[in-house]
Amino acid sequence: MVAVKVEGYTRVASVDEMPPGIMRKFDLGGKEVLLANVDGKYFAIENLCTHRGGPLDEGRLHHYEVECPWHSSRFDLRTGQVTEGPADIPERSYEVIVEGSSIMLRVK
Ligand code: FES
């Protein structure tokens, strides 16, 4: 998906493309970022698991947590913190805003 930069934020999707219960990955300046919609709220963390690089977008969403498909580490989407190992390093989290129908991630 092509991302468009606007005033420090990057538009990654429209709200129509991200209904509740959905998570998808986006390329944000060379970084893979996972965007998830949990009960109408959007959260974004880095997509590659800090344990051994598993693709979190291919894992499972458990309310506010995402489970890595490789060794089942869990991360809190609100903070990036590890909630279950074997990972012990948190994921970077990204600020998400909604402008009109656009979902935007803060780039820095
Ligand atoms: S790579 Fe994610 S738990 Fe091991």
Image (cartoon, rainbow, N blue to C red):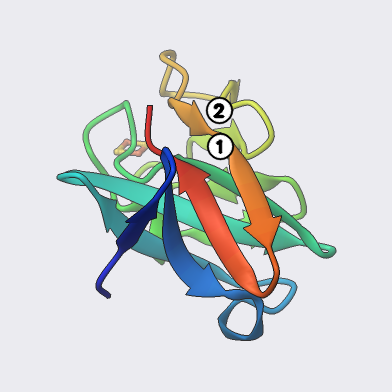
Question: In terms of image quarters, where does ligand 1 lie?
Answer: top left
| Residue nearest the observer in this picture, 5 or 45 | 5
Report if residue 69 is visible in the image: no
Residue nearer the viewer, 13 or 57: 13
What's the distance in space between the residues labelled 1 and 2, CA to CA? 9 Å
| Left/right of residue 79 with respect to residue 47 in the rendered view | right
Q: Secondary structure at mark 2?
A: loop
Classify 10 Å Cα crowding around label 1: few (below 14), some (14-19), many (20 and above).
many
Query: What residue would you read off at disc 1?
Result: 74
Q: Nearer the viewer, residue 97 or 93?
A: 97
Q: Secondary structure at mark 1?
A: strand
Residue carrying label 2: 80
Q: Residue at x 53, y 55 (%)?
A: 104
Locate the C terminus and report the quarter of the image it occupies.
Answer: top left
| Residue positioned most to the top | 88
Q: Quadrant of the N terminus?
A: bottom left
Residue 95, given in percent of the width and then of the height, sits at 58, 35
Point out the residue furthest to the front here: 7
Relative side of 63 to 52, left or right: right
Above or below residue 63? Residue 100 is: below
Report which quarter residue 24 is drawn in: bottom left
**Circle nearer the N terminus (1, 2):** 1
Give coordinates of residue 61: x percent, y percent: 62, 59
| Residues packed near mark 2 inside 10 Å, few (<14), some (14 to 19) or many (20 plus) | many
